[in-house]
Amino acid sequence: MDKIMVTRSSMPPYEEYIEAIKPLWLSRWLTNMGVYHQDLEKRLKEFLQVSQLSLFTNGHLALELALQALKLEGEVITTPFTFASTTHAIVRNGLKPVFCDINPDTYTMDVSKLESLITEKTSAIVPVHVYGNVCDVEGIGEIARKYKLKVIYDAAHAFGVRYQGKGIGEYGDVSMFSFHATKVFNTIEGGAICYRDETFGKYLYQLKNFGIRDEETVDGIGSNAKMNEFQAIMGLCNLNHIEEELLKRKRIVERYRERLTQVSEIKISKRQENVQENYAYFPISIKDECKYDRDQIYRKMHENNIFTRKYFYPLTNEFQCYHGQFNSNRTPAALQASRRILTLPLYADLEIKDVDRICDILAVLVRGGD
Ligand SMILES: *Cc1c(COP(=O)(O)O)cnc(C)c1O
């Protein structure tokens, strides 16, 4: 049996990309906010339905620099059920992450636990639209207004998601999207920050280019996080096919849902109301009734040439690099989720017959078969 990987990067037809990059051999403008960079910003702003958008060479640096541009201090409330990037971006800004537990149904921040974590040192909230699931943006917004906190969404998984008919990047002060090769939309590596405040935008632009204001003025301690033209063109080409890609993902997710709702030993996520999904991931949670635990299911799937991912395990507040600093027992729902979660293979070109094979094998395994 062929191997089924957990993900596979989307690429435009070879000829389309090769044609599109040809002009670069004439212009020799390879990076530093060239014409394709500008074009991609414009087209993404439209597609994501956001007011302002700034491109970056990857999502992580985008998040790191957005936090810097907001000039935050002290403590930042976030969740540990995420990719390393979210927590590292906070810590690398000299800020202290304070971990809020998650809602076990959506895996996003449990807003009922949020208020009790706020102290006089709290300056911001960094929630994650994990798997493309929409956070309780109203609840978070209300608390942020009450305590005058900034809200920065890690929307790395949420490309193209809409809530109440609005682009997800319009919620909070700032949102970060990732365009990494494994994400729903990619620029090989890449990312963007969406925002509304013009002053913030100008400073952010400076920070991605060494803090340079003009030829003779450097008044920000910036980094280098510019997206190059080859990345931007990959983005423009991939954007030409995005609707089709999303439709293919939708069909796969619908098949998974149809097949796996009947399997009582695993829990699958419910659809969220008023949300236009992007079908980024298909997480399942292994229940107690299951004959094998999560790690055994993971191994046995692997033996059947099906590659799943323990995404997210471990929690970021359990990482070795943070040893002794945080206590993951204070986020029990996140801890439970991380011990039970598996994300199943999902990418646009995954065939329905392979989805069926994955579901067949899973259905046997959860009842103790091999
Ligand atoms: C992918 C990802 C990032 C970082 O994005 P890169 O573009 O890979 O730097 C941040 N947060 C989450 C939740 C992610 O999945």
Image: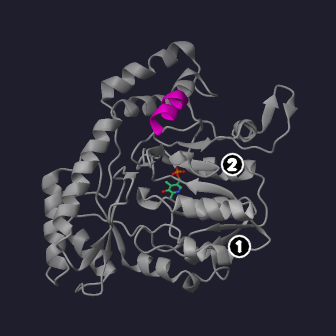
What percent of the width, then of the height, locates residue 227? 58, 35
Query: Residue 280 lies in magenta, yes or no?
Result: no
Q: Nearer the viewer, residue 92 or 246?
A: 246
Report the residue at 42% width, 56% height from top: 132
Left or right, residue 165 beside residue 283 = right
Between disc 2 and disc 1, the foreground one is 1
- Quarter of the rendering containing residue 188: top left
Residue labelled with disc 2: 65
Q: Nearer the viewer, residue 274 or 102?
A: 274
Q: Amino acid at mark 2?
A: Leu
Secondary structure character of the magenta stretch overall: helix
What percent of the width, then of the height, locates residue 342? 34, 70
Q: Residues within 10 Å of mark 1 (few under 14, many from 20)?
A: some
Q: Which region of the structure is painted magenta? A: 40-48
Colouring scheme, one of rainbow, by chain, secondary structure, one colour: one colour
Residue labelled with disc 1: 118
The residues tagged by marks 2 and 1 sit, at their Cα atoms, a distance apart of: 23 Å
